[in-house]
Image: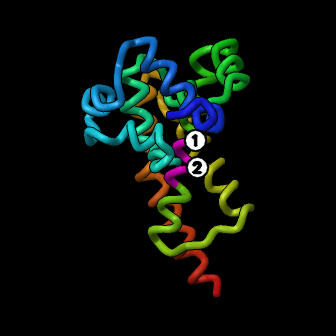
Amino acid sequence: MTKDKENLAPEWVKNLRRLMDEQGLNPRKLSLLAGLNATAVRDMIEGRSRFPRYDTVQALADVLGTTPAMLMSSKKTGAEIQAKGAPFGHNIEILAEIIGRLQETATELGRELNPREFAAMAATIYRRLQDMSDDMSHKSRLSSIKPQVYDLLEYETLRHKRGK
């Protein structure tokens, strides 16, 4: 990658490259360690894969010894996450996953959400996760997002149909 292209790369790609360099990993090795296809990281670095899925980012972050929030953040946001500690970083990860899953699932179900509906659903799921037992792990909370998104979208779809 030329210096000009590298400077234009999204912040998360710069973070990815920096962490790879620090740990002596090339794109192929990182891809394989993360359980991805051999060219996945190269495709991200070269701009062919601009918006990786959350589970892909999670796999990369695990190998690189960081969090998805830190990997995908700007320098300013990364500094804020570090300053505020792990709980703040976990909340950002949870919100990012809720938003991603909600968008993905709404599209999958052919459901268009206006901004107010989207925000209300995201807030509902976030509150449910916050209300879960304190002894539940961060990963367990993340894995419970997708079923909650489906349940909430199906409920709202039925509610809208009955209201018409």
Determine which residue is flagged by label 2.
99
Badge 2 vs badge 1, beta-carbon distance below 8 Å: yes
Q: Which part of the image, by quadrant, shows the C terminus?
A: bottom right
Residue 14: percent from left, percent from top = 56, 28
Residue 27: percent from left, percent from top = 35, 30
**Image position of 36 (left or right of 82):** left
The Cα–Cα distance between marks 2 and 1, rounded to whole angstroms, is 5 Å
Determine which residue is flagged by label 1.
96
- Would residue 72 be visible to someone looking at this image? no
Label 2 Cα neighbours within 10 Å, binned few <14 / some 14-19 / many ≥20: many
Residue 115: percent from left, percent from top = 72, 62
Residue 30 falls inside the magenta stretch: no
Q: Secondary structure at mark 1?
A: helix
**Image position of 15 (left or right of 140):** right
**Image position of 160 (left or right of 45):** right
Give the residue drawn at x 45%, y 46%. 53
Between residues 64 and 126, which one lies in front from this camera angle? 64
How many labels were placed on the picture? 2
Between residues 153 and 97, which one lies in front from this camera angle? 97
What's the residue type where badge 1 is placed?
A: Ala
**Image position of 23 (left or right of 112):** left
Quadrant of residue 96 within the rendered picture = top right
Between residues 104 and 117, which one lies in front from this camera angle? 104
Give the residue drawn at x 68%, y 55%. 120
Q: Which residues are magenta?
A: 96-101
Between residues 155 and 94, which one lies in front from this camera angle? 94
What's the residue type where badge 2 is placed?
A: Ile
Label 1 Cα neighbours within 10 Å, binned few <14 / some 14-19 / many ≥20: some
